Image (spheres, grey):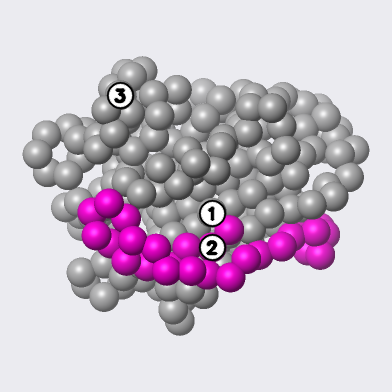
Amino acid sequence: MVLAAGITGFLVLGVGGDAGKPDAGPAGADTVPPSASPGEPRAGGEDGTAPLVPGWKTVVNPKRGIAFDVPAPWALKSTGWVSYVAENSDLEETPLVGFSAPAILKEKWCRSDDDGNGTQEDTPLAAAGSRGEPDARSTAEAARENARLWVYGSYAQPSKEKVTTGAAKPFTTRSGITGSVATATSTGVDGTGRCSYDGRATAFAFENPAGETVSWTFVGVRGVDDEVPEATVRKILSTVRLVDSTP
């Protein structure tokens, strides 16, 4: 799966990860079996994985012990699916930032061969996922860096000056998790490619009960008719909660 300037997705077999590299190279999104039937949550029950919003789906990252809800049209990837962004010029595709077990809205929203390599690439309208933040010095730093890197890597690169990152602010979810939220946007993407658009990302970072910093991030196209409304992004964010994690 490729998003705008270069979000790559792959299925991690055997072990989980947030932004590691696959052993056998990237796998196309259409090769990954769905983790749930359309309209059904990935998991249910009384363990925190039932949707908080009626009619929505629950997205679960079992490795990180994080769950959140998305509207019914969103598609859920498997819990072993990882998405990341890298510099377009980096042949090794060293991840700048990534997240696991994502949900994606309109995965084939735009299709093009903007880099002229003969391969048609799909740009989804939006995606959201969660990850660990082992290198973050604070939740505010983690939130701002996540938002900035997703917008730069997905939409603005190589022009870092086209990304504006807002200040991190306190935020508390419906379940009582308190952390820091920040939003970044791009402005003035040249649009030379058929699927070149400005974008935005909102990231929420917080500490789990073990004292580890973790995060949730939304990333999506900005300035189009079917852009995900800010109210919807905030509603999704409000459902972020802790669930039992798996080793």
Q: Residue furthest bottom?
A: 137
Q: Which mark is residue 182?
A: 2
Viewer-side residue, 221 vs 244 = 221
Q: Which residue is denoted by mark 3 in the rendering?
A: 55
User: What amino acid is at disc 1?
Assistant: Thr
Q: Residue at x 63, y 27 (%)?
A: 226
Secondary element at tag 3:
loop
Decide: few, some or many residues near mark 2? Use Cα within 10 Å; few <14, some 14-19, many ≥20.
many
Secondary element at tag 2:
strand
Q: Indicate whether 7 appears above or below 137.
A: above
Q: Quadrant of the N terminus?
A: top right
Q: Residue at x 58, y 58 (%)?
A: 183
Classify residue 192 as left or right of residue 140: right
Q: Which residue is denoted by mark 1 in the rendering?
A: 202
Secondary element at tag 1:
strand
Q: Hey, which quadrant is residue 161 in on the image?
A: bottom right
Highlighted range, magenta: 157-183
Q: Residue at x 54, y 63 (%)?
A: 182
Counting residues from the N terminus, which is met first, the one under dot 3 or under dot 2? 3
Counting residues from the N terminus, which is met first, the one under dot 1 or under dot 3? 3
Residue 241 in magenta stretch:
no
